[in-house]
Image (tube, helix red, strand yellow):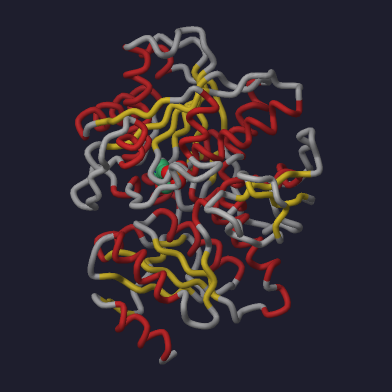
Amino acid sequence: MGEYVVRCVSDGSVQPPYSLGCPKDNSLLRAEYKARRLETASLSGIWRFQSWLPVQGIIAGAGAAPVTYKSQGLGRELGLENLFISFNGYWPERGARMPTGSFKDLEAAPTMQRHREQFSDQAGRRSLVVASAGNTARAFAQVASQIGLPLLLFVPQKALERMWTTVPPGAVTLVAVDGDYCDAIDMAEKALTLPGFVPEGGARNIARRDGMGTVMLDATLHIKRIPEHYFQAVGSGTGGIAAWEAAMRLKEDGRFGSNLPRLQLAQNIPNAPLYFAWKCQEPEACCSNMFDDVLFNRRPPFAVPGGVRDALQATLGEVYGITDDEALEGKRLFEESEEIDILNAPGVAVAALQQAVKNGSVLSDEIILLNITGGGLARIREDGTLYRLVPDITVSRWEDAVQFLESR
Ligand SMILES: *Cc1c(COP(=O)(O)O)cnc(C)c1O
């Protein structure tokens, strides 16, 4: 099991294990695991990395792992000899079985397990609250339904079509928000002032980050060394921070090399606050009309200690601004060369890789890890029943949401 202490990145002070923040500043917390070498357990899915996950137990039947493989098709198209793909979705022929088809499944399982451990003496009475443009809500709804824990979701009406599970829905309360993702976040924050509701913490939750960090762990075990580049489409950048943190642990392990992968993060312009923040331009904070709105985040953890800026600086990283057309072309190229459908977001990452090849930022023999953060939804639909999540209420004002929650 994962034995660890939790420290503030800014001053190294040890904090209570379930904290989401630091007392002195807005620093992220980071888990420091007792195991300094990566020991894998003979457990299934991500639980095999349990010694580097902040959980004591596991959720049997949840926590599908990333799958790393060496690309043939896309690698050939781009002239890359050592392109490795971390596939985070549903592709049973390759052993990838993420039930809701995105790498949010990597975050949901350890976060729910940790929530269950934190409130083990009062099971059922504390509801985790999640605001999401779709993929996160779907992943959390899936795990909550599997283990019978209550969950409160705030989702913009536009994203309702993304709301389904592959198991019968459990104690999931779905509030549809007549508004955008920002409105959903605002309402979730209001709900958290009511008793019985617990924030999941987003990027501040070490279980979410270390769950996503298994992408780097799995890839490094597969390649037998730490990759030289890591490509990912980001919204909040949490996956980038997670990859950096996992790589630091692997570097300290000593068996996989002494480099850190360069973070090559990609956002969809113009709604690309991390891209503009890194390039020192003003972010355009609007939510609408994105190629993929799962990549929008209004307050990404950019300048906080241990956040995206630190990760980029420490790894000599880069952020790419990708247009809709480029993303569409990246998606098409991937689907044709690797023969699996992917979500729009990873199309943004493929486009960034294309740019990096073109401008010489990556060399043909370098070891590149491309995180395909979601895919295989067509396969999920073929293989089983999807249970639609129906909103319990649709609200346009937070007062109505609060009234609904208080009346239950
Ligand atoms: C959430 C999400 C991302 C971006 O994740 P970060 O939290 O910003 O690292 C990328 N792709 C897909 C499919 C996602 O659901």
Query: Which image quadrant: the C terminus?
Result: bottom left
Q: Which of the 4 image quadrants contains residue 191?
A: bottom left
Residue at image x 68%, y 20%? Answer: 224
Residue at image x 58%, y 72%? Answer: 149
Instruction: For residue 379, say whether it is visible.
Output: no
Q: Quadrant of ligand 1?
A: top left
Residue with the most extreme bottom position: 407
- The mark tally for this picture is 0
Q: Could you tell me residue 37's position as x and y percent?
A: 79, 33
Is 335 left or right of 33, judged from the image as shown?
left
Residue at image x 38%, y 9%? Answer: 360
Q: Which of the 4 image quadrants contains residue 376?
A: top left
Q: Does 42 appear above or below 130?
A: above
Is 173 left or right of 315, judged from the image as shown?
left
Q: Does 149 appear above or below 238?
A: below
Q: Nearer the viewer, residue 1 or 401?
A: 401
Q: Could you tell me residue 406's position as x and y percent?
A: 42, 89
Q: Nearer the viewer, residue 3 or 65?
A: 3
Q: Does 260 appear above or below 290?
A: above
Q: Could you tell me residue 250's position as x and y percent?
A: 69, 29
Q: Does 278 appear above or below 356?
A: below
Q: Could you tell me residue 254's position as x and y percent?
A: 76, 23
Q: Which of the 4 image quadrants contains residue 138?
A: bottom left
Is 118 left or right of 266, judged from the image as shown?
right
Instruction: For residue 149, say whether it is visible.
Output: yes
Residue at image x 79%, y 35%? Answer: 36
